Amino acid sequence: MARKTIYISDEDLELLQKYKSEMKLKTDSAAISHLIHSTEESFEEKIAVAVRKELDKNYYQKERLRWSTVTAEQNSIILLDMLNTLFYKFDINACIPVDLTEHVAITQSRDRLKEKIAHFKQKADERKAKGKDF
């Protein structure tokens, strides 16, 4: 252990004594050591927060978009196969556009999708709110 002589102002000494008392430390050296180490932890926390923000900003959104695109493509293929099968099964030879008339099942599906999107948005908002406490 090295011995050092340092000079601090009366004002700084008063603050050091107050800190030592609040932290229930026995010596000035212990108070200074605690301050130095708490600064290191604070620096590490700042790095962790910066890394998390960078990941949220650039990586997670891109991964989510990539995953969503792949899933949408797979679902489109499945739906087209199912519809094609139904058309052949029931010998349907005409197309009725949804904007002309929408079947009740499609309306229900749209409503369910809106509820699902609202649910996931709420979950995302909750995660973001937790992340700010990080």
Image (cartoon, rainbow, N blue to C red):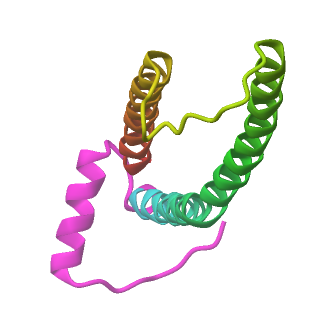
Q: Horizontally, is 119 left or right of 69 in the view?
A: left
Relative to 81, say whether 69 is above or below. below
Which residue of the protein is positioned furthest toward the top in this rendering?
90
Q: Which residue appears at 53% of the width and 66% of the height? A: 50
Name the residue: 63% across, 72% down: 2
Q: Which residues are magenta?
A: 1-30
Residue 120 in the image, given as x and y percentages of width and height:
46, 33
- Along the line of sight, the residue nearer the viewer: 99 or 34: 99
50 sits left or right of 99 in the view: right
Q: Nearer the viewer, residue 119 or 34?
A: 119
Vertical comparison of 53 with 13: above or below: above
Q: Position of residue 93 (x, y in %)?
A: 73, 29
> Residue 46: where, in percent of width, then height?
50, 64
Q: Quadrant of residue 8?
A: bottom left
Q: Does residue 46 appear left or right of residue 70 in this picture?
A: left
Residue 73 colored in magenta in the image: no
- For image coordinates 63% across by 35% down, the residue present is 95
Up-down relation of residue 130 to residue 83 (above or below): below
Residue located at (31% from left, 45% from top): 23
Q: Position of residue 33 (x, y in %)?
A: 49, 61
Residue 87's image quarter?
top right
In front of the other: 43 or 94: 94
